[in-house]
Amino acid sequence: MRLMMLIATTDAEYAVLLSDYISEHHADTIEVSVCSTLECLNEVLPKQRFDVALMDKSMVEAADKSSIKQPMLLRVENEAAVDTPDMESVCKYQRISSIIASVLERYARVSKNRISSDSRNTNITAVWSPTGGVGKTTVALAYAMSKVSEETEVFYLNLETFSSQSGYFCESGKSISVVFEMLDSHEGDVKMLIQGICCRESGITYLCSPSNYDDICILSSEDVKELVTSCAQLADELVIDMSSVCDKLTRQIFDIADKVLIITEPTLTARTKMIQFATQNDVFESIKEKIILVANKGAEIHSPIVETAVFLPYVQSGNAIDVYKTLSKSNF
């Protein structure tokens, strides 16, 4: 589903700038129309319905807005809508990317759509280990970056109970917790909300860390399925970074995933837990054909538990970003 958006402003130059940006960056999400005069607006509105409209004050005051589901005032600083105190507004003079993010987020909250029927041939890769501290997030991001270098659209989704994600990204956007809230309410368009609040660094799209990590613990199996499905529709490769547990949510993600990277390292603890997982857990046999064993930090594998393995070197650096970018050049 594409959002039908109207830009109604007498500032014709600004309207063209905004419209061109949307056409270049959001053509698969938003279909945009432009009216720079009241005459044009009065001609268009009776003929077409719009999901959202960005309108300057003169247009808001004069137009019949009955065919617009979500009219929004395109305001300058300190300006308010006349006779429409409850109207949503967005500041005109800010980064256009921020304007579009705000529009998508706000519309998502009033939309009735849930999981979209849109399809995308997305590869889902789960990254997991039975042992904590083996460099799972570093490897997950290295793998994501390796796909970016192949000009693949990559979405990185961190679902760890406690995460080191903030050490890799600037996290200047809204928390993934707002997505969890929408999932819990069973209202709104999750995919559109994610489109509105996601961030992008080094070619990787991601959601900022939870404001409270307890939020992850209350996700149901259906919540996780909808979250993963929504993210998958926004990229060609979805990389899911997971906690080192093997609970029902982990099993569900294993089931959804096309590929599972299982990380190990040279320590005795990591080797012992890997053997236990392979020999004493029924999940292993159910996903064995999907597994790629990743030997991190220069680990050697004397008795491979699966046919496919990747060997990563030990990178000596105190900068986590440098480490994952170096490892991204490995042959995954």
Image (spheres, grey):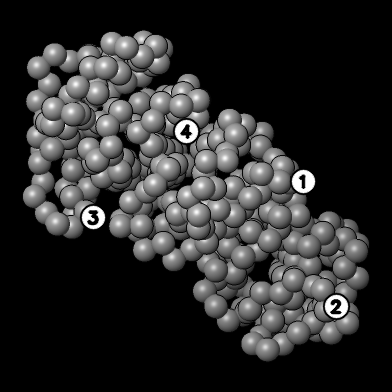
Q: Secondary structure at mark 4?
A: loop
> Whole-Å distance between the Cαs marked 3 and 2?
48 Å
**Residue 204 in picture, x, y percent from top left:** 38, 50
N-term mark: 4 or 3:
4
The residue wearing badge 4 is 122
Q: Is residue 1 visible?
A: no
**Residue 222 in picture, x, y percent from top left:** 62, 31
Q: Secondary structure at mark 3?
A: helix
N-term mark: 1 or 3:
1
N-term mark: 3 or 2:
2
Corner quadrant of residue 128: top left
Q: Amino acid at mark 2?
A: Thr
N-term mark: 1 or 2:
2
Residue at x-position 59% and y-position 55%: 178
Locate the C terminus by quadrant. Answer: top left
Residue 84: assigned label: 2
Viewer-nearest of discs 4 and 1: 1
Q: Amino acid at mark 3?
A: Ile
The residue wearing badge 1 is 112
Residue at x-position 36% and y-position 57%: 166
Residue 267: assigned label: none
The residue wearing badge 3 is 321
> Whole-Å distance between the Cαs marked 1 and 3?
39 Å
Closest to the observer, 219 or 329: 219
